[in-house]
Image (cartoon, rainbow, N blue to C red):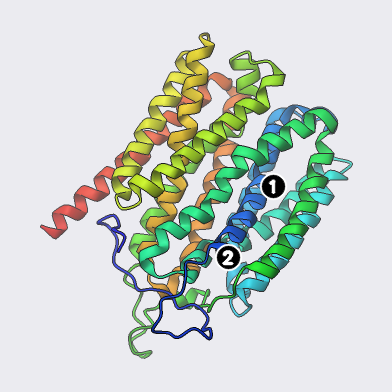
């Protein structure tokens, strides 16, 4: 059984929809379903983050400042924050499998509307539509991997699913950026919309359906106890804690990453032709970090989080300090990609281990809310810093936020050890 951080309570396994196979025989690992789920994650994250690589082109075309284009990430993320939990509750009786298909179709519509948008305000409206779909998507996908496998395989399943997000930074955003530079940013969104429709077909064909638990607020009642007692699920505090640490970490990260294109072009003086290769290198480094989670830190998530947060702070500090020394700055940039690539899978794995089976869907909705509150808050914080004190201060603030998150992880672990002693 995969070990978890000592702050979390143990949970049971999630039943998969019964099949003809005998229950006494352990089913094979669902590679096809998880890879399909990972592909859907790839498309979703690419759609969310593509504006970060196309800031200059979209800014010129729509006649707004680059910080306003960066705020498209905030509009998207804050929509997720506001709609994720209520939409998850509203759709709690719908089949999880069908919801993913519907969400991918809505993503396609959102990207088509973005591509044909005549004004900045129209783009904002299209992004809001995408944000609603994104919130529902993650409230379902966050727990879907755990529904497909027993608890001992959750870490492995989550790593495969989250790999789609990592590959979005490896291929999706860099290729979308390169395509936007060559053919125009609007065509990038058209291609992405077409891929969303292909993804919907793949999900319909290859992703197996799963049994669902309640996704409503009532899931936070302990359903293992008599209904008359209606006791609160004992794993809620652990879920709330990991969601808080996740939100703080993402605020810091996206205050800087949202504006990484102008930082690379103006702060480091990188030639525009090198922008897509650098983003590709950052994504590949993130894939290495994900591999480290699956091979080294999966059984030791506390150690992985501490090392990931500390190494991210060091790499971003070096990037800020050596802007005039391009080889050092690029090496620090790639190191940052690797160390940060470790954090989302570790955070999500800890959350899924923390939540009891009966609240995993709801916990995933709140985790999605925290994650996207961090994304939107970070993009907004970065815009404020750029407009008022300059781009050079953004990585410094990011390092400060990482230190806060690191201290919270360390303090929480020590408090838990004392309670056990």
| Residue occupying image coordinates x 31% and y 60% | 2
Residue 226 at x, y = what percent? Answer: 34, 90
Local SS, label 1:
helix
Residue 109 at x, y = what percent? Answer: 80, 56
Q: Is 169 left, or right, of 191 in this rendering?
A: left
Local SS, label 2:
helix
Asked whether disc 1 touches disc 2, contact meaning CB atoms under 8 Å apart, the reply is no
| Residue occupying image coordinates x 64% and y 16% | 270
Q: Which mark is residue 393?
A: none
Name the foreground residue: 53 vs 250. 53
Residue 214 shows in the view: yes
On the image, numbered disc 2 is attached to which residue?
Answer: 33
Binning the other alpha carbons within 10 Å of mark 1 as few (below 14), some (14 to 19) or many (20 upward) gives: many
Q: Is 84 left, or right, of 72 in this rendering?
A: left
Q: Quadrant of the C terminus?
A: bottom left
Q: Earlier in the sequence, mark 1 or mark 2?
A: 2
Q: Furthest residue to the left?
A: 421
On the image, numbered disc 1 is attached to which residue?
Answer: 47
Q: Is 289 left, or right, of 324 in this rendering?
A: left
| Residue occupying image coordinates x 48% and y 71% | 147
Name the foreground residue: 67 vs 178. 178
| Residue occupying image coordinates x 62% and y 44% | 168
Binning the other alpha carbons within 10 Å of mark 2 as few (below 14), some (14 to 19) or many (20 upward) gives: many
Q: Quadrant of the N terminus?
A: bottom left
Quarter of the image holding residue 187? top right
């Amino acid at each position: 059984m995969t070990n978890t951080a000592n702050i979390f309570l143990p949970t049971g396994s999630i039943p998969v929809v019964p099949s003809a196979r005998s229950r006494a025989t352990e089913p094979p690992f669902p590679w096809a379903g998880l890879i399909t789920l990972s592909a859907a994650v790839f498309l979703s994250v690419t759609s969310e983050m593509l504006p970060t690589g196309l800031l200059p082109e979209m800014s010129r075309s729509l006649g707004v400042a680059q910080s306003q284009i960066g705020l498209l990430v905030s509009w998207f993320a804050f929509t997720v924050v506001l709609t994720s939990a209520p939409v998850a509750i509203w759709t709690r009786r719908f089949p999880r499998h069908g919801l993913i298909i519907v969400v991918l179709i809505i993503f396609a519509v959102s990207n088509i509307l973005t591509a044909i948008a005549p004004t900045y305000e129209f783009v904002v409206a299209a992004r809001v539509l995408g944000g609603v779909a994104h919130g529902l998507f993650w409230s379902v996908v966050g727990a879907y991997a755990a529904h497909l496998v027993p608890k001992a395989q959750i870490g492995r399943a989550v790593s495969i699913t989250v790999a789609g997000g990592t590959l979005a930074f490896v291929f999706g955003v860099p290729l979308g950026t390169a395509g936007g530079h060559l053919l125009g940013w609007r065509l990038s969104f058209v291609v992405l919309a077409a891929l969303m429709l292909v993804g919907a077909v793949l999900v319909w064909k290859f992703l197996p359906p799963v049994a669902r638990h309640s996704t409503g607020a009532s899931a936070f009642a302990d359903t293992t106890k008599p209904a008359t007692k209606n006791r609160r699920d004992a794993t809620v505090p652990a879920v709330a804690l990991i969601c808080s640490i996740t939100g703080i970490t993402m605020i810091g990260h996206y205050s800087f990453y949202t504006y990484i294109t102008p930082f690379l072009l103006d702060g480091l003086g990188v030639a525009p032709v090198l922008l897509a290769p650098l983003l590709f290198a950052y994504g590949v480094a993130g894939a290495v970090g994900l591999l480290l989670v699956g091979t080294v830190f999966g059984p030791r998530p506390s150690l992985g989080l501490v090392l990931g947060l500390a190494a991210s702070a060091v790499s971003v500090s070096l990037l800020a300090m050596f802007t005039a020394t391009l080889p050092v700055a690029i090496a620090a940039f790639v190191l940052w990609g690797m160390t940060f690539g470790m954090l989302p899978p570790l955070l999500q794995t800890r959350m899924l281990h923390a939540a009891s089976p009966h609240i995993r869907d709801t916990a995933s909705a709140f985790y999605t809310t925290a994650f996207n509150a961090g994304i939107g808050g970070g993009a907004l914080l970065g815009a404020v810093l750029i407009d008022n004190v300059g781009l050079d201060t953004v990585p410094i603030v990011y390092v400060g936020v990482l230190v806060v998150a690191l201290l919270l992880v360390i303090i929480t672990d020590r408090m838990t050890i004392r309670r056990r002693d």
